[in-house]
Structure formats: structure tokens, C-alpha cells
Image (cartoon, rainbow, N blue to C red):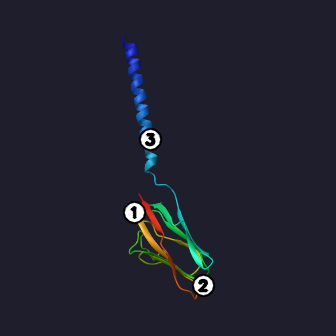
Amino acid sequence: MRTPAALLTGAVIGGLVTYVGVRLYDKRDMNDEPRCEARVQIVRSGTTFVVKPKNVCLYAGHHLKWEVTTPSTDKVEILFASPGPFKYDPANNPDNTSPGVYMTTTPKDIASNEALSVGRFPYTVKWTPAGGSPQELDPAVCIRR
């Protein structure tokens, strides 16, 4: 009678250890931040411009990239309420002219610095065509942990 009870106890303990071990092992990967890159396109469309997508999400510690494809004579400013959700580092990012402000006068990719704050941050994209009046759109970025 002891042998079957011992075998049953061993099988139950082994099954329990395996079940708990697999559950703990699977949760290790949940702590890894996803490797993602948020991209926003700023494109001229006739006499106006478009920001696609209007709202974008990314994880804290990651960068947001704006693809500016307007003519080289136009000025594009990206304005967050100061100081903005991104690290201010003009030494490593010349497009980051002041806290929460990115600017370019040439078509290129503008990369933000790493996201520090968590939440929803509306911002303004201001496009000034050469010899024209400025136009504004108000997209947003959502930053998560």
C-alpha cells in the first residue's frame, strides 16, 4: 500500500512543480519591453498637409520618429506643451531646439529623444509653406509602461 501511495504522491508533486514552473517561466517574457518603433508621417497634400496616423502609441524609453516629406522651402515645427514627454538633449538631437520643440526646414526623418513620461500628450504640428500662412494640426502620442 505504501508503494502506490508514494507513486501517486510523487506524480502529484511532479505535476504541480511542472505546472508552477511553466507558469513562472512564461511570465519572465512578459517583463521584456516590446521592440517597436512608432512612426508618424507628415506629408504635403495639395495646398495643405496631413499627419498619419493622427494618434500613435509607444512605450516609455522608446523614440517617436516623424517622417517629414514636405518641400525643402517649407518649415515644419512639432510643438509639445513644455517640457514635453521626451528627454531634452539638443547635443545629440539638433532638431530638438528647446524642451518639447522639434523643427526642420528640410524633408527628413526627425527622431525624438527617449520618452520619459507616461500618459497621453497632444501636440501641434505647424507647417509653414514658403511664402504662405502657417497651418496647424493637433495629433497626440500615448506613452505606456
**Image point (47%, 63%), residue name:** 62
Check disc 3 and report its element: helix, strand or loop: helix
Q: Position of residue 78 (x, y in %)?
A: 48, 76
Sequence-wise first label, 1 or 3: 3
Seen as rendered, the residue at the extreme bottom is 131
Say above or below: 76 vs 35.
below
Distance from Cα at disc 1 to Cα at disc 3: 30 Å
Q: Position of residue 12 (x, y in %)?
A: 40, 24
Residue located beneath label 1 in the image: 119
Q: Label 1 amino acid?
A: Gly
* Residue at the disc numbered 3: 25
Q: Secondary structure at mark 1?
A: strand
For disc 2, the marked residue is 73
How many other residues sit within 10 Å of disc 1, few (<14), some (14-19) or many (≥20)? few
Among the 4 quarters of the image, the one containing residue 129: bottom right
With respect to residue 15, does 141 lie above or below? below
* First in sequence: mark 1 vs mark 2: 2
